[in-house]
Every structure is written in C-alpha cells, then in structure tokens.
Image: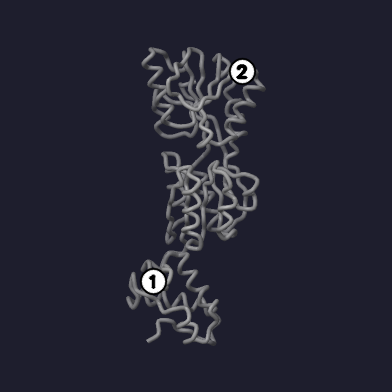
C-alpha cells in the first residue's frame, strides 16, 4: 500500500496532499523515526506528478524537522512530532544571562508547536560560516546575530532571503533583511547624557572595550560624548595589571571585568561610587543586588525576544530599533 494518497479532483494542492499523507502515516504508526521514505522519483511516477511538486512537499517537511535528507541515501523520518509548524535556526554569538532572558522571551512568545535550535559562533568567522552552510535549507526561519564579524552579508546570502532575520547588531549591507537591533552609538551617548551630573563628579572616564567582541558603535558613542562634554577619557581593552585611581569612572561591557574591578576596589580599600564609579552594560537581576546595585545601560531583552517572535510569526518585514535606557543605582 502506498504511503502517499493523491486525489486529482481535490482543491488541496498536490504537494499539500503529499505532506498530509506522510503526516497521517506517522500518526498512524506506519512510519516511524528512522524509516526511509519512498524516493522522489517513486512518488512522482506513481502519481504522475512533477518532480518539483514532490520536492516542494519534502522541503516543507524538512524545514519543519519532520524528515531529513541524507546525501546519497534519500529521505528519512526525523521526528514523529507532526505538530511542529515552524523549525527555527537561532544563531547567537555567545550565551550569557541577558541573552538567556532574550531566548526565554522568544520561546514563550512563539507559542506551541514551534521548534527552535540554538547555535553559537563565539565570534569565530569560520564557525559562523560553517553553521550557516551546514544548516542552509533545513529551517523555516533563520535568526542571525552577526555581532561585529566581517563579511557576514556574503555568508548570510547563502540562506533564503525571505527567511532571514537579523538580531542585535546590523549594518548597511544587511539592511534588506528584517531586523530588531540596538543603536549602540546613540544608546550609550543618550544613556551617559542622562547621568551627566553624576558623571562630572569624576575626573576621568575609562571604557573597557574589546574590539573583537563588542560593537564599534559603543566606542564611537563614548568618544563623541566625551568630546562634546570635554571629559578626560581613555579606552582600554583589558583590566589586567591596571591599578585604579581615585576619581575614575569605569564603563564596563562584560561581567568578568565588572567583577575584577569590584574586587580590585575592595582590595585597595576604596569605596564604590565615592572613589571609583561603575556603569555596566546590559542589566541583570544580579546587578540589582551586587554592592547595593550597579548602574547599567541596557536594552529590554524581553521585549526584543517578544518582538522577534512577532515578526517571524507574522512574516513581517521591519527594521526595529529596540529601546534602551540608563538605570541609575549606587555604583554611580
């Protein structure tokens, strides 16, 4: 008995009938995970269909994760969960507490019957390219966090354009993709502007900035702010071997250096805020508590996840700048 049933007089497109037939066979137990499907040519010949019609049906099942193709062998059942409507490829640069907030918000907002597979490129160009190449064509949507890697537009171009969404950082070569992003240059400038009275109590602003991992816009916005307000400033890429001086205000973009500075302040018997100020990037629950509260400049990662899910579910093309704000606490 053939797995696929086609009704010539049905108003349902023939490729949809193939999809429904395979789903029904899986639900009935006739097909199980690991079973091989009839070949494209077999289904084509049995039902007098074009090869493209059968391929369209298989590609839909493939992007939903229900079947997989193995080069030289054919198509196999990959999952018995036929309720999966979307299969989403999510490529982060790295995982940390605020990215976890974004991820959880994204999953919750997507609702049921959607599979999200998460990957990390760790700011490695080769890894970025490999993950995209290895997964091209397997998903119904691709969410890409390019960070500040070079030539990402050329690599992303290998994916179906209508299925790509850019997250967090973007640039002119990616403007033809829908995106939800941070305006890093504007955000740090405006955040510091809000706290200008507090900032002027310090003699010098020091930005801890690693160009390989952090957005250029943050450095640009910082330098512009210091220039406009005629503030002494310095940009360093590491806190290692540095001795803090009374009157310095540190703007810290990663949590490891934040802890190092706090530890160093304690070791020197200095007082946070009074002797040394700190502004940290990206708010977390921990920063509300540590040392009575760390001042942060942060986007709303929960909102970012919600809006991203909305764009994908509605197949919406939009360039959305996520809101950002300064939260003043006792470290400033």
| Label 1: which secondary element | strand
Give the side of residue 87 with respect to residue 316, left or right: left
Crowding at dot 2, Cα within 10 Å, few <14 / some 14-19 / many 20+, comes out as: some
Residue 138 visible in the snapshot: yes
Crowding at dot 1, Cα within 10 Å, few <14 / some 14-19 / many 20+, comes out as: many
Q: CA distance from mark 2 to mark 1?
A: 64 Å
Of residues 170 and 6, which is closer to you in this image? 170
Q: Is residue 1 above or below residue 295?
A: below
Q: Which mark is residue 76?
A: 1
Give the side of residue 82 with respect to residue 145, left or right: left
Residue 144: % across, % down: 52, 50
Give the side of residue 202 with respect to residue 285, left or right: right
Residue 190 visible in the snapshot: no
Residue 212: % across, % down: 52, 36
| Label 2 close to label 1 by CB (< 8 Å) | no
Give the side of residue 8 with respect to residue 264, left or right: right
Q: Quadrant of residue 233?
A: top right
Q: Quadrant of residue 70?
A: bottom left
Q: Quadrant of residue 35?
A: bottom left
What residue would you read off at disc 2? 231
Q: Residue at x 49, y 49 (%)?
A: 128
Q: Is residue 59 above or below residue 165?
A: below
Name the mark nearer the viewer: 2 or 1. 1
Q: Residue at x 42, y 61 (%)?
A: 113
Q: Split into 4 quadrants, where in the image is the N terminus?
A: bottom left
Q: Which mark is residue 7?
A: none
Q: Quick one: label 2 or label 1, which is nearer the N terminus?
A: 1
Q: Residue at x 53, y 37 (%)?
A: 299
Of residues 187 and 123, which is closer to you in this image? 123
| Label 2: which secondary element | loop
């Amino acid at each position: 008995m053939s797995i696929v049933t086609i009704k010539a007089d049905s108003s349902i497109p023939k490729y949809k009938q193939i999809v429904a037939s395979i789903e029904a066979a899986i639900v009935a137990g006739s097909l199980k995970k690991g079973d091989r499907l009839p070949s494209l040519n077999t289904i084509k010949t049995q039902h007098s269909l074009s090869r493209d019609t059968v391929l369209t049906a298989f590609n839909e099942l493939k992007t939903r994760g229900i079947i997989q193709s193995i080069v030289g062998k054919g198509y196999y059942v990959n999952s018995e969960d036929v309720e999966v409507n979307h299969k989403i490829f999510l490529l982060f640069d790295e995982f940390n507490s605020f990215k976890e907030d974004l991820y959880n918000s994204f999953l919750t907002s997507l609702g049921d019957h959607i599979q999200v597979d998460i990957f990390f490129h760790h700011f490695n160009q080769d890894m970025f390219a490999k993950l995209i190449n290895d997964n091209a064509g397997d998903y119904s949507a691709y969410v890409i966090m390019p960070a500040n890697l070079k030539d990402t537009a050329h690599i992303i171009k290998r994916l179906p354009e209508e299925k790509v969404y850019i997250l967090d950082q973007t640039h002119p070569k990616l403007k033809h993709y829908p995106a939800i992003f941070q305006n890093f240059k504007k955000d740090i400038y405006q955040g510091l502007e809000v706290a200008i009275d507090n900032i002027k109590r310090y003699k010098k602003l020091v930005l801890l900035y690693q160009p390989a991992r952090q957005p250029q816009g943050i450095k640009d916005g910082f330098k512009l702010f210091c220039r406009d307000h005629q503030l002494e400033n310095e940009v360093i890429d590491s806190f290692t071997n540095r001795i803090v001086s009374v009157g310095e205000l540190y703007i810290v973009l990663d949590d490891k250096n934040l802890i190092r500075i706090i530890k160093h302040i304690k070791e020197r018997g200095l007082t946070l805020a009074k002797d040394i100020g700190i502004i940290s990037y990206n708010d977390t629950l921990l920063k509300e508590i540590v040392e009575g509260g760390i001042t942060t400049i942060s986007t709303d990662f929960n909102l970012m996840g919600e809006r991203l899910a909305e764009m994908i579910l509605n197949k919406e093309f939009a360039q959305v700048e996520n809101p950002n704000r300064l939260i003043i606490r006792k470290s400033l």
